Every structure is written in C-alpha cells, then in structure tokens.
Image (cartoon, grey):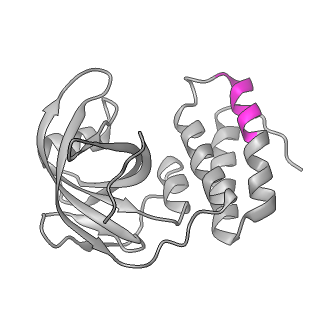
Amino acid sequence: MARLTSRIHEVIVTTLDEGARPHSAPMGISEVNGYFHIKPFKPSSTYDNLKRHPQCTINYIDDVRVFAGALTGRRDWPTLPCKQIKGEYLEQALSHSELEIERVDDDDPRACFYGQVVEELSHAPFRGFNRAQSAVIEAAILVSRIGMLSEQKIRDELAYLRIGIEKTAGERELEAWGWLMEKIEQAGIHIEHD
C-alpha cells in the first residue's frame, strides 16, 4: 500500500470504547518517519479510547456519509473484526490499516499518538473522489470548526463548495450534504438554499 506523502489525509479513525464498542471519527492524519500521527483534540472520545486501548484502525473510505454522519450524530456504521489487533474496521472501507500506538506526546489542546502499522488490507478499488465527495469532506471540516470560524467564513466556503455538489453529487453525497447543512442551521448559521 502506498505511503502517505502529503501533509494531512482525511480518514476515519476507529477506536474501541471502554465497552469494546467501535467508535469511528473523521480525522486528519499524517505519516512521518514510518509512524502515523493521530492528533485528537482533548477532550474527545478518540483521545480517551487511545489512552485506554493503544490500538486503532485507519479506514480509507469513499462513502462521505461516514464523515458527515460522525459530525451529525449518525455513527452506527457496520464494522468487522481486525486481523492483527483487538479492534474493528468499517465494513465499507476500501482498505484499512491496523495500528499499534507506540508512544504519545500528551500536549494540549491535542495529543499526538504515534502508530505503527501492523497490518494493511485492501477490500475494494478506489475509483477517485468526485467534486461533491471532496465538497462534503470540506463541509464536514467546517462543521467541526463551528465556534472557531466566523459565520461569514463558513457561508463563503459553503457557497463555493455548493458548486461541486450541484455538478457532481450522487445520492450518498446529497444525503451527507443535507445532514451537514442541517447541523450548520442548528448552530444558528443561516445558509442560502436554491
């Protein structure tokens, strides 16, 4: 499997909670000197889970509903057991990496967990993202930053992202986009609808 070479890649990180139930969260990760750097905010479920159980799965996925769902209370995606670690990976993952956490820099406001790959498996081919899929991922990042970004910045970014949705969205992307727009409206940010 190809190594990550750019700075940050948007993936789904699956950890186990205290009851050994999978918890999946979108996260930007990077790979440096053979280690995946996972940097959850504190406090967060991912942080707590990794501190308690230092293993996780990196899911490479093209169903952007999983990204949007994690930010809008829709987290019940089917999982399957990992091969080399005690953990789960998302059933719809195109591929996944199983990681052992080897060390932690426990800084504020984000810790950095250094994960070593112990298994990588491919399940289906990656056919590339269309513009709508990329737009949903970018909108999910905006939703995760509500309270940190100005309302105008969010509106401006969404106006541009909407172009990709209008031109290339399929059913899954439209559903994910709708969830995110609902979340933004619930935060009190009025957005223009066509």
Residue in view at x 27 percent, y 72 percent? 121
Where residue 104 sits: x, y (%)? 15, 34
Give the quarter of the image for residue 80.
Answer: bottom left
Give the quarter of the image for residue 19.
Answer: bottom left
Residue in view at x 76 percent, y 32 percent? 156
* In the foreground, 53 or 136: 136
Left-right relation of 103 to 110: left
Residue in view at x 61 percent, y 24 percent? 149
Give the answer, above or below, for where 148 lies relative to 32.
Answer: above
Where residue 46 sits: x, y (%)? 29, 44
Q: Does the magenta stretch include residue 32?
A: no
Left-right relation of 129 to 9: right
Give the quarter of the image for residue 45.
Answer: top left
Residue in view at x 54 percent, y 31 percent? 145
Q: Is residue 156 magenta?
A: yes
Left-right relation of 69 to 157: left
Per the rendered image, the range of residues in magenta is: 150-158
